[in-house]
Amino acid sequence: MTGTLYIVATPIGNLEDITFRAVRILREADLIAAEDTRHSRKLLSHFGISKPLTSYFDHNKTLKGRYILDQLESGLSVALITDAGTPCISDPGYQLVRDAVAAGFAVVPVPGPSAAITALSASGLPTDAFVFEGFLPNRQGKRREKLASIKGEQRVVIFYESPNRLLAALTDLQEVLGERELVVARELTKVYEEFIRGNCSTVIDTLQHRTIKGEVVILVAPAAEGAAHKDVASVADLLALLMEDEGLSLKDAVKQVVLQTGLPRGEVYTEALKLKERD
Ligand code: SAM
């Protein structure tokens, strides 16, 4: 008889958001694997749960993954939790789930809060289709590339961001996407929960003279229909300007245009090749 791996969501702030089932599973599990055992011990003691704990985080996941699979093999049930929210969602767990599935163990989700869905549900943005992009890259160049890649996105795009990079991210967002509607959801389910809604300028104005604390989610409204394609007619002009007047190489010109327009790289590249052949 082999054990079961439970993927247990825990609150993202408000402790009342844990489910009855999550508490029961954590009470019944033989072993709880936690991202940060010290952090999770507080949560567990709040619910009167005292169980063997082991750590499972990004830097020990290979070794600990093996250990957890061994426990499952010997018939024990293991509950995986992270510091907050749903494991595997911008949190450790994916590799363990994958390995457990491959080894034939039962993997059972115990659903609960996740900041992305919590933010979306009260954002006031369309909820019929959305994209979750996890954390934006830390470096400005990569961040702008990522933002350019969603310029024409017709679904809401959800990002996680750290409070100290929020303003830099919003400024890049405004420069790359223009005056897009967005929502910043801060400190969800906590005492200072706040939704800041508006276009980029108004959200930046609201935040720029404040010390931004706590946890944040950024939600970007869908592009107006055809936004990614409205510049198509001018792509050739832009490429010509960059390659002929400014002397950029084809590769660099394509990179610039992709960044500025959000058009697919292949499309811009084909346009650049046509220009080169014409000359
Ligand atoms: N697994 C978690 C989940 O299901 O939401 C996400 C973990 S990720 C390491 C942490 C990020 O989630 C934070 O930096 C923030 O962007 C977002 N987040 C988590 N809790 C939040 C909260 N209470 N309010 C706003 N954002 C939150």
Image (cartoon, rainbow, N blue to C red):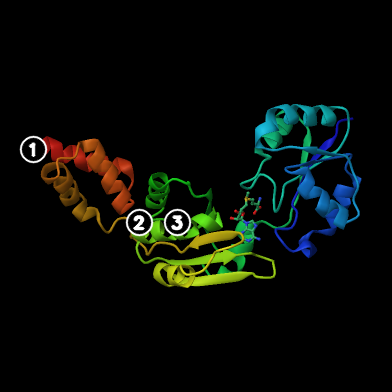
Residue occupying the point 74% across, 58% down: 11
Residue 126 % position (x, y): 52, 66
Q: Quarter of the image containing the C terminus? A: top left
Residue 96 % position (x, y): 70, 34
Q: Label 3 sits on what residue type? A: Ala
Label 1 sits on a secondary structure element that is loop
Label at residue 169: 3
Q: Nearer the viewer, residue 129 or 15?
A: 15
Q: What separation in Å lies between label 2 and label 3 (alpha carbons)?
A: 10 Å
Residue 222 % position (x, y): 44, 62
Q: Which residue is mark 1?
A: 279
Q: Is residue 34 above or below residue 204?
A: above
| Residue 251 visible here | yes
| Residue 126 visible here | no
Residue occupying the point 36% across, 63% down: 225
Residue occupying the point 40% across, 58% down: 173
Label 2 sits on a secondary structure element that is helix
Q: Which residue is mark 2?
A: 176
Q: Is residue 68 above or below residue 119?
A: above
Label at residue 165: none
The mark that comes first in sequence, 1 or 3, is 3
Left or right of 277? Residue 149 is right
Left or right of 158? Residue 245 is left
Residue 25 % position (x, y): 86, 49
Left or right of 244? Residue 114 is right
Q: Label 2 sits on what residue type? A: Val
Q: What separation in Å lies between label 1 and label 3 (alpha carbons)?
A: 39 Å
Within 10 Å of disc 3 (Cα), the crowding (few <14, some 14-19, many 20+) is many
Q: What separation in Å lies between label 2 and label 1 (alpha carbons)?
A: 30 Å
